[in-house]
Image (tube, rainbow, N blue to C red):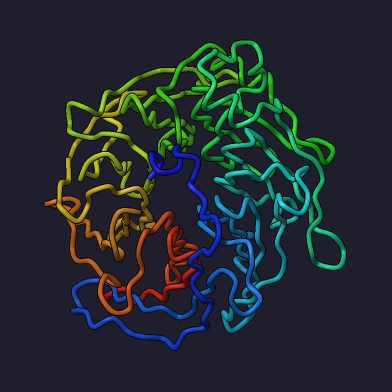
């Protein structure tokens, strides 16, 4: 939950509880044939078997070929690289930590994207207020290139009551998430700057995309934490939806025929009982947007009712959804997965044409237990990658969907 993160991710001093890395035997969860089965194929845990840099893992990215997995850590202030071989065996390869070189600007690392099949990695760091660029070298590893930041300390941003004002030039204070737009362009949601900003990779450097920022320069987004693309199947035109955490709002950005996105709709989610939207995912094939409300026990389902206008068509409330902060929907929309940092297990969601979305079951909440999940990523239809914030673990879950 982002509320826990805003407590400066309290770090253990002295003896810390660090869980192990194990290449686990596959354990099949005993489930009905009515919904997908999940089993742990592998897990990598901080400070065991040579694995490092995943204390409080927050998010992952993968290379286009799905053979590399990149993980950012909020408490190790790190970026770590893993490799999958042809048999889907997971191997730890490399880590970058702030403690080794503070030029990396990885304090409270919160998100990562991979460009050009993993040739470039870009991280966002919540406490350093920074974007950092890493590039692949001929030997197969990675090297640090540079970082982009206004160089304001976490104490100045989070503890000092004096407004930062003009010191916030880049609008990168507490960047929570990065959305890759293509192999060169990306957009960042910055929680403390209350801003959405567009950037691009140019000549091996991160630079601001000023033409794209024209429509959002003076907009407020309610402390944004996520940006989701929406594709109109009829026109092929992309829109962006921004989740405002503190204000519990969604803001629709539409590009139209211009070079930049502009605000075309704002939706208040409080009237639907949704507080603190934290994760979103669109399923293009069925024209639906799913929003996880981490401050309540709900997932909202939205649909575009007319051009540039979205409406809530379903509110899914369930005790298992309390604090839900992660979503991963299958491409066909039939099944999905959700989780909360406040609880154990993966919530399996089912989507039916007549009744819509519902909670089907919860798995991995007993033995074995996967708890305090910070992210879910369906990298392939048969592979769900899970990060556990308190278990300091990266899990690979094999997915077997019902026919």
Residue 245 location, quadrant: top left
- In the rendered structure, the answer to whether residue 307 lies left or right of residue 298 reads right
Q: Is residue 288 visible?
A: no
Front residue (pair 241, 206) = 206
Front residue (pair 216, 148) = 148
Up-down relation of residue 29 to residue 297 (above or below) = below
Number of numbered discs on residues:
0
Q: Image point 17% across, 50% down: which residue?
A: 356
x and y, in percent, of residue 374 in the image: 42, 54
Q: Can residue 85 be seen in this view?
A: yes
Front residue (pair 299, 105) = 105
Q: Image point 22% across, 51% down: which residue?
A: 321
Q: Image point 51% across, 55% down: which residue?
A: 12
Residue 108 location, quadrant: top right
Up-down relation of residue 18 to residue 232 (above or below) = below
Q: Quadrant of the C terminus?
A: bottom left
x and y, in percent, of residue 342 in the image: 30, 53
Residue 402 location, quadrant: bottom left
Front residue (pair 282, 284) = 282
Q: Which residue lies furthest to the right in this view?
A: 138
x and y, in percent, of residue 331 in the image: 39, 57
- In the rendered structure, the answer to whether residue 200 lies left or right of residue 323 reads right
Q: Image point 23% across, 83% down: which residue?
A: 30
Q: Residue furthest front?
A: 14
x and y, in percent, of residue 350 in the image: 22, 60
Q: Residue furthest left?
A: 355
Q: Quadrant of the N terminus?
A: top left
- In the rendered structure, the answer to whether residue 21 lies left or right of residue 332 reads right
């Amino acid at each position: 939950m982002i509320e826990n993160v805003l407590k400066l991710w309290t770090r253990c001093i002295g003896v810390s509880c660090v869980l192990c890395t194990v290449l686990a035997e596959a354990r099949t969860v005993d489930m009905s044939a009515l919904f997908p089965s999940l089993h742990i194929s592998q897990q990598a845990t901080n400070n065991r078997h040579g694995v490092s840099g995943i204390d409080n893992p927050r998010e992952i990215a993968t290379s286009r070929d799905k053979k590399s997995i990149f993980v950012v850590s909020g408490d190790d202030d790190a970026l770590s690289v893993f490799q999958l071989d042809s048999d889907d065996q997971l191997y730890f390869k490399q880590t970058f930590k702030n403690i080794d070189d503070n030029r990396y600007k990885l304090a409270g690392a919160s998100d990562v994207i991979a460009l050009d099949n993993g040739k470039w990695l870009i991280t966002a760091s919540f406490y350093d207020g920074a974007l950092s660029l890493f590039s692949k070298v001929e030997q197969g590893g990675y090297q640090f290139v540079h970082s982009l930041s206004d160089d304001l300390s976490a104490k100045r941003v989070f503890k000092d009551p004096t407004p930062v004002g003009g010191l916030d030039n880049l609008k990168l204070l507490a960047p929570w998430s990065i959305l890759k737009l293509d192999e060169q362009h990306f957009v960042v949601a910055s929680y403390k700057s209350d801003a959405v900003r567009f950037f691009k990779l140019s000549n091996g450097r991160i630079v601001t995309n000023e033409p794209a920022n024209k429509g959002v320069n003076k907009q407020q987004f309610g402390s944004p934490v996520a940006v989701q693309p929406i594709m109109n199947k009829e026109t092929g035109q992309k829109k962006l939806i921004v989740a405002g955490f503190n204000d519990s709002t969604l803001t629709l950005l539409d590009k139209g025929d211009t070079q930049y996105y502009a605000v075309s709709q704002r939706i208040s989610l409080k009237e639907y009982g949704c507080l603190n939207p934290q994760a979103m995912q669109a399923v293009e094939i069925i024209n639906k947007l799913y929003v996880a409300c981490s401050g309540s026990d709900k997932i909202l389902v939205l649909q575009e009712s007319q051009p540039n206008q979205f409406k809530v068509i379903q509110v899914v409330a369930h005790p298992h959804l309390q604090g839900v902060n992660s979503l991963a929907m299958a491409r066909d929309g039939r099944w999905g997965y959700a989780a909360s940092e406040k609880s154990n297990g993966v919530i399996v969601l089912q989507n039916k044409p007549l009744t819509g979305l519902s909670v089907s079951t919860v798995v991995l909440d007993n033995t074995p237990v996967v708890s305090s999940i910070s992210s879910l990523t369906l990298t392939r239809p048969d592979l769900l990658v899970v990060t556990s914030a308190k278990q300091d673990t990266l899990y690979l879950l094999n997915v077997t969907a019902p026919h």
